[in-house]
Amino acid sequence: MNAHSSVYEQDSNDRLQILDPDGNVRPDAEVPDLSEAELLAMYEALVLARRFDRRAISLQRQGRLATYAPMTGQEGSQVATSYALDEQDWLFPTYRDHAAKHVHGMSLTSLLAPLRGYREGYAIPDGVNVMPEYIPIATQIPQAMGMAWGFKLQGQQDRAVLCHFGDGATSEGDFHEGLNFAGVFDVPAVFVCNNNQWAISTPVERQTQSETLAQKADAYGIESVRVDGLDPLAVYQATRGAVRKAKDPGPGEGRPTLIESLQYRFGAHTTSDDPTVYRPDDAAEYYRERDPVDRLRGYLTNEGILTDERQATIEKRVDDRIQTAVEEAESLEADPDDIFEHVYDELPRRLEDQREELRELREKYGDSAFSEVLE
Ligand SMILES: Cc1ncc(C[n+]2csc(CCOP(=O)(O)OP(=O)(O)O)c2C)c(N)n1
Ligand SMILES: [Mg+2]
């Protein structure tokens, strides 16, 4: 598959776009109603996400973090969808949605802690409406639908649910079941398909024969929007509209939406993956020219909102916050015994034996020498 015939590049008129690659407002495009402070906050979240990603990959390479799913190239869309939520709304993230989780209230430390084996990091912090990340593909879709349906049954008309998933998830039964129920019961949910064009090594062209993923909504009587996922303002606009529509309390209103956010996974699927063995890298330059962080930066600079001085302040603040989070996450004590918890109600014999062996090793060598013993 030649990267230059990818779905992102096919026809740029078939999707919502506000900024061109240099950050200029496209003719006829309407800029969302965001204050300067809001735009700067959104931009800072983007810079943070980009730098957090780089740091997390580096930590994993040093053996200080478990397998990590990079989001570079996709953070513009993630930040924008979460910005479009109100505080009381719920977010259903995947393993790649670090930036979306952070914008909706998860601390940076709690993003890193589970990746250091600290299982409390998976708990939902008080007052933060973010579900634990979903690793089984598409499982969250019917669950998000269920929560949204619950809000509707309870008459909580000011609440919406936003559910993220990838292009690969659209081949799962859960996607079709979730969307079908959502259409039938008119639930206040926004389904965001982050079409990064790859499901590990499977290109989206092998995922479906449908022309777009957005059109799958037609089968369930749900409206859909296709948006340029490398354009944070366009994603914000599309998502904000969908959130409003989900909550609209008018009779017969309050409808779900499927958003297809067209992106590209700039990096590897996870830190355990090597994309060079299954996809050409000649696409990288094309997408880097449309980089979501540079694009918003271009717009803010053109508008005179962002100066070099402000940029430097943002970078410094962001790096300090990441450093503090890394230190906090590394100071938490994870109990190796926890790896046997929360999968089985009763441990099978085989795992019982392994747990015993691990305990004996720890007793004999102590926890500090323990990692050397394993090597
Ligand atoms: C039910 C299920 N089947 C298979 C896997 C293995 N798996 C992990 S990620 C992935 C690809 C998912 O691709 P996509 O939905 O496009 O999301 P992306 O990783 O691109 O964000 C697969 C098949 C899984 N986690 N869950
Ligand atoms: Mg994908």
Image (cartoon, helix red, strand yellow):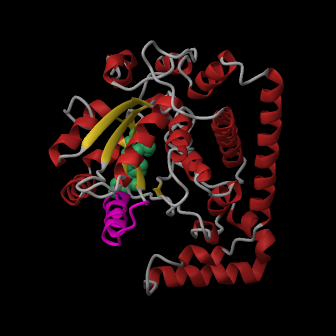
**For this rendering, which residue is in front, 36 or 71?**
36
Q: What residue appears at the point 67 percent right and 46 percent down from the top-left corner? A: 56
Q: What residue appears at the point 41 percent right and 57 percent down from the top-left corner? A: 161
The quadrant the C terminus occupies is bottom right
* Image spot of residue 104 (x, y percent): 58, 53
* Image spot of residue 337 (x, y percent): 63, 78
Q: Is residue 238 visible?
A: yes
* Image spot of residue 153 (x, y percent): 30, 70
**For this rendering, which residue is in front, 350 or 209?**
209
- Left or right: 4 as drawn, with respect to 336: left
Specify whether residue 147 is painted magenta: yes
The outermost residue toward the left is: 219
- Left or right: 74 as drawn, with respect to 59: left
Identify whether 115 is placed above or below 229. below
* Image spot of residue 58 (x, y percent): 70, 42
The quadrant the N terminus occupies is top left
- Which quarter of the picture shows residue 267? top right
The segment highlighted magenta reads 138-158
Q: What residue appears at the point 40 percent right and 53 percent down from the top-left corner? A: 163
- Which quarter of the picture shows residue 139? bottom left
Q: Can residue 213 be seen in this view?
A: no
- Left or right: 67 as drawn, with respect to 368: left
Q: Is the magenta stretch mostly helix, strand or loop?
A: helix
The outermost residue toward the front is: 250
- Which quarter of the picture shows residue 371? bottom right
Identify whether 139 is placed above or below 295. below
Specify whether residue 229 is painted magenta: no
Q: What residue appears at the point 42 percent right and 34 percent down from the top-left corner? A: 196
The outermost residue toward the top is: 27
**For this rendering, which residue is in front, 167 or 185?**
185
Identify whether 58 is placed above or below 24. below
